Image (spheres, rainbow, N blue to C red):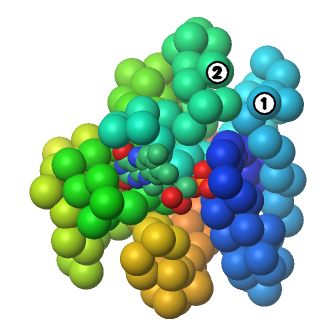
Amino acid sequence: MIQLFYGSDTNKTHRVVQEVMLPLFEEHGVSIRDKVVSELKPEDWTENEVFIVGVPTWYYGELQSDWQAYLEELKGVDFTGKTIAIFGLGDQWGYDEWFIDGVGILAEVLIQNGAKMIAPWPTEGYDYTASKALNSEGDFYGLALDEDNQYELTDERCKKWIEMVVNELHLTEKSLSNSKKAEAAE
Ligand SMILES: Cc1cc2nc3c(=O)[nH]c(=O)nc-3n(C[C@H](O)[C@H](O)[C@H](O)COP(=O)(O)O)c2cc1C
């Protein structure tokens, strides 16, 4: 079971989650429990190991309103041993100096608090000036979607990214069970 937590002010993230991502995960046989950030409870982070986090960016590089309201609480969560894949929605032409900054703001808190981030996403195919969402390799921390300018690419991008997520999770599971086997053999 994977938890998918997201916020959405004008329903674009909501639509992508409900109409594109959930059916794709279902095709892979992965069950997802989705929840909006405004309804998060502290135990939502403790009961599971794997999370997907979705955040649109608003108002010149700010978090979507529910994530913004939740940020201080998030800073107090321990993510040691947790695996997280992040995705963000933004507008690369209208807000080219802050493209999906919210992804970077959240990813930094998650990493700082011990999370292992998976499924980074290449920056090819986007046209923006600056973004806080870049990791040390120069990739986005996770999937970047632009429903304002490149909505026709959303389905294909989600398909590829979800494949990445599923593959990386299988690898993680395999390496976990291998290390357990190694422990048992000792
Ligand atoms: C007033 C306003 C400010 C925005 N600021 C940014 C921004 O700084 N960076 C960015 O990448 N996108 C920005 N966007 C684009 C939104 O992130 C984009 O429309 C997104 O799909 C909205 O998702 P939601 O409906 O799930 O909230 C902005 C949009 C509006 C209307």
Callout 2 touching callout 1 (CB < 8 Å): yes
| Crowd rating for badge 2 (residues with CA inside 10 Å; few <14, some 14–19, many 20+) | some
Q: Quadrant of the C terminus?
A: top right
Q: In the image, what residue occupies the spot 78% across and 86% down?
A: 27
Find residue 127 and report its horizontal and vertical position in percent: 20, 71
Question: Which three-letter amino acid code belongs to the residue tagged 2?
Answer: Tyr
Q: Earlier in the sequence, mark 2 or mark 1?
A: 1
Question: Which three-letter amino acid code belongs to the residue tagged 1?
Answer: Ser
Q: In the image, what residue occupies the spot 79% across and 18% down?
A: 42
Distance between the alpha carbons at the discs numbered 2 and 1: 8 Å
Judged left or right of residue 127, residue 6 is: right
| Crowd rating for badge 1 (residues with CA inside 10 Å; few <14, some 14–19, many 20+) | some
Q: Is mark 2 within 8 Å of ligand 1?
A: no
Above or below residue 129? Residue 111 is: above
Q: In the image, what residue occupies the spot 56% across and 11% down?
A: 72
Residue that label 2 marks: 70
Residue 172 falls in which quadrant of the image? bottom right
Secondary structure of the residue carrying tag 2 is: helix
8 or 135: which is nearer to us? 8
Judged left or right of residue 102, residue 31 is: right
Residue that label 1 marks: 38
Above or below residue 67? Residue 8 is: below
Find residue 34 and report its horizontal and vertical position in percent: 82, 52
Q: Is residue 29 visible?
A: no
Q: Quadrant of the N terminus?
A: bottom right
Secondary structure of the residue carrying tag 1 is: helix
Q: In the image, what residue occupies the spot 71% across and 78% down?
A: 20
